[in-house]
Amino acid sequence: QVQLVESGGGLVQAGGSLRLSCATSGTIFSIIVMGWYRQAPGMQRELVATITSGDTTNYRNSVKGRFTISRDNAKNTVYLLMNSLKPEDTAVYYCAVTNALKTYWGQGTQVTVSS
């Protein structure tokens, strides 16, 4: 059974950094894209960043230049390096892995940025 397990969240002051990791257990065949999403209280889940199997990356405008998504295919892991964090980045962050059949989701990790 496939599971995605996020780690690396926590409490950080504004301007600080965190690195999120998402490890996959089980085998996901023919991955098309891996990504990070976030959901703040009372808000809809939103896309943060994605990386394709060909290593093409995409970011939401508000995180461009501050966040970097990467992947380690050998470890089946996707990372999100978050620098210059702002209070508005506070949310639960979810990783997602998509193949031709479905999208798998992790359970989420809380990121809190204090001002």
Image (cartoon, rainbow, N blue to C red):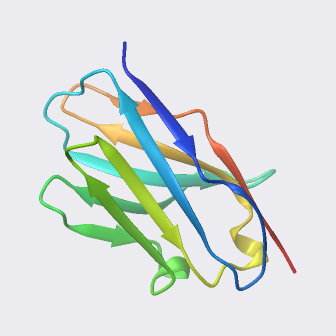
Residue 111, quarter of picture = bottom right
Q: How many marks?
A: 0
Residue 96, quarter of picture = top left
* Residue farthest to the front, as pictured: 75
Residue 58, quarter of picture = bottom left
In front here: 46 or 114? 114
Q: Position of residue 113 (x, y in %)?
A: 78, 70
Query: Quarter of the image containing the C terminus?
Result: bottom right
Q: Position of residue 23 (x, y in %)?
A: 41, 39
Q: Is residue 37 above or below residue 55?
A: above
Query: Quarter of the image containing the N terminus?
Result: top left
Q: Position of residue 80 (x, y in %)?
A: 46, 62
Question: Left or right of 84: which side holds 47?
Answer: left
Question: Left or right of 5: which side holds 114?
Answer: right
Residue drawn at (30%, 27%), measured in percent from left and top? 102
In front here: 87 or 46? 87
Residue drawn at (66%, 54%), measured in percent from left and top? 9
Residue drawn at (24%, 23%), measured in percent from left and top? 27
Q: Position of residue 44 (x, y in %)?
A: 66, 51
* Residue farthest to the top, as pictured: 1
Residue drawn at (29%, 38%), measured in percent from left and top? 98
Q: Is residue 8 above or below residue 88?
A: above
Question: Left or right of 24: which side holds 89?
Answer: right
